[in-house]
Image: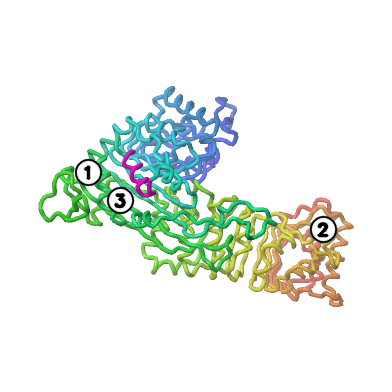
Amino acid sequence: MDPTKLEGFLPRLSQTLEELELLYFQFCRGYTADGVPDPASPNFFRDHTQYPAVRSLTIYRFDGPPLLDRLQHLFPALDGTLHIMSDPSVGSPAHEAFRTANRRAQDGSPSHAWKKLDRVVCSAGMLHALALRCPIRHVMLQRRDEERPRYAADALRANPVQRLKLTLACGRGMFDGIFTPELAGTLTHLTLVLVHDNFDERAERDAADAAQPLWDFLLGATRSALQPLHNVTHLRVVIHCKLHRGRNPWQRREEPADAPAAAREPDRDYPYSEAFMAAIRGGPAFDCDFATSLARALPSARYVFLMTGGNVVVRDPDQPARAGAWRSSERWNVSRGWRVANAGPATGGSTHPNGHGGRLGDGDPPAGALVELQGDVAETIIRNEELLLSQTDEKFHSFLFADAATRAPHIRALSIQNWRPPPVLVLAFQAADQASPDVDVAALLVEIITSCPQLTDISITLYFDSIHDQPIVAAIAALQTLRSLTVTGWSTNALNLLREVSSPIRTLSIPSFYNVDPASLEMVLPHLAPTLQELKLLYFRPRRSLTDDVPGSPDFFRARTQYAAVRALSVGQLVGPPLLDRLQHFFPALDGALLVGGADSTLDARAREDVRAANRRAQDSLSPHWQAWKKLDRVVCTPSVLHLLTLRCPIRHLMLDLDHDHDDDAEEPPIRRAAEDLRENPVRA
């Protein structure tokens, strides 16, 4: 989506539209074409319609440079929420050029610059590149591990804010000077989300280097970082954990294939500390002592809220070491809140602990003591003071696990169409509403998959090879309830999922693999042959090479697995000649739908007649390998494909696609050949 496309349908709403959400948006395909001040340029951005009523803008995927002159021209009155996810160019060598251009956009035409923004939701790199100078009340920074930490510090030093939500990966340097004196002078509300995952061992290594237990390391780093924040009145600290327990086969050293078993290095355990677990589950360490130490670090503190949540996953010992599924063995979510006595309104506190967690009685608490808040009161304050997490963790996942026993059994289908390795963009099951990579989305997906006992239909996109995909692939592969699976993408993880899925799949769709042939099917699908009833392929090459025709050859097509349960076959494009002996061998019981989007259009007249003759022989009852189809309920194809197939079996319903028949070298129109075929084999509809 770009401004030119918006011109096609949106200008009529320009005077009333107040809030706009876009999945993808770009200013130009070439980064500079729309900046040419040439009246003859159709993409010159100042020629596009403005939307002066828009107060809030959300763009989940911003492609191209985040240039303020364009944004300010299109949305001149923006003063509510700007939610904009990063483009790969943010953090690139061009990053500083974007930042400089954005400064100029606010210098040269101050009348066009935004006057203020209520909330900005983006990554640290995006905030840095935008170089916003207008007052911002609330910034919510998403987690971007690959960005240099200085981005957040520099951006917030140049334009400090009152309210900040910050998500960081636990480890050395996680704060890295982000709380500058400039920010300390304005910041009053801080939500700090610390994400710990022992899948990578950075936090454990950093703690070991500091000669401290992991919990003490995290607490010491947090307290030290908060000390400069002398104006913070409301603090919320959230520690989100995803802990793997047991052997870690992915950390095994590469060994020669012929190395003896005794010489191979064993799998290492994931780092796992019982002391850390005792604290992180909400024990005494993560209680009044911790809250008190944080309050003492903040001289203006009025409220302190703590939350710890996460889960422990273990390997299923019954699964192969490399492909074994993860399963959740423990899940927790603990949230508590306190007010600081005599530091603000005494809202809702009924009892108060002393510094060691004991109760002091019903009298007035001493100044500075923590007064525990009732749960509903704490939630109300968190909501009213906007100490909120991103909604990634509060949409589908919260809906499901708020009452998992009741809701999870009713989840039948899950679509994960836009899953990418972190940073995550948009998940298909989310409403288009402030999605962001603040939490371990891969862990959430695994938890959802493993917690829904009646999942029968999953669709997933796996275009990239990433270790973040492996737990998801393992969780799907371990399911026994699936009946329908769609795998889009050509990554190794996509192939692994097809190989390892253990459910009795009935419908399988592989809409993105190119040039699938019998040999590649043999690598991933034979274990599904007993149950597979419907197969959908983007491309299929029935004959890979001439050796397919040679009996005794390892590639001989009759030595390949047959899919005798398949009743419906859909192929977007047949590559090479559509040979019926192959199709009938691989799918001998086909009697439902046969959909063929197209076939090889490079065949000359002689080759076409040879294919037709071969297909007639393949349906000859005298053939020693006779497996001709008995009937077909529906055939959808082009006239050229129908002519090449020369089907003789009864067909109930024929649908001819005339728009995609491109046999330009034919001596007669394809539809005329189809008419000839219909005379030989008339259909009912």
Near-viewer residue (198 or 74): 198
As rendered, which of 232 and 54 lies closer to the eye?
Answer: 232
Asked whether residue 576 is drawn in magenta, I would say no
* Quadrant including the N terminus: top right
Dividing the picture into quadrants, the one containing residue 375 is bottom left
Q: Mark 2 falls on what kind of element?
A: loop
Residue name at image x 51 percent, y 34 percent: 48
Q: In the displayed structure, would residue 354 be above or below residue 18?
A: below
Question: How are the colours assigned in the image?
Answer: rainbow
Residue 16 in view, yes or no:
no
User: How far from the left and from the top, in percent, is residue 119?
Assistant: 36, 40
> Which residue carries the number 2 mark?
545
Q: With respect to residue 342, does 522 lie above or below?
A: below
User: Which element type, helix, strand or loop, lies under badge 1?
Assistant: loop
Query: Callout 1, which amino acid?
Result: Arg
Q: Is residue 220 magenta?
A: yes
**Mark 3 or mark 2: which is in front?**
3
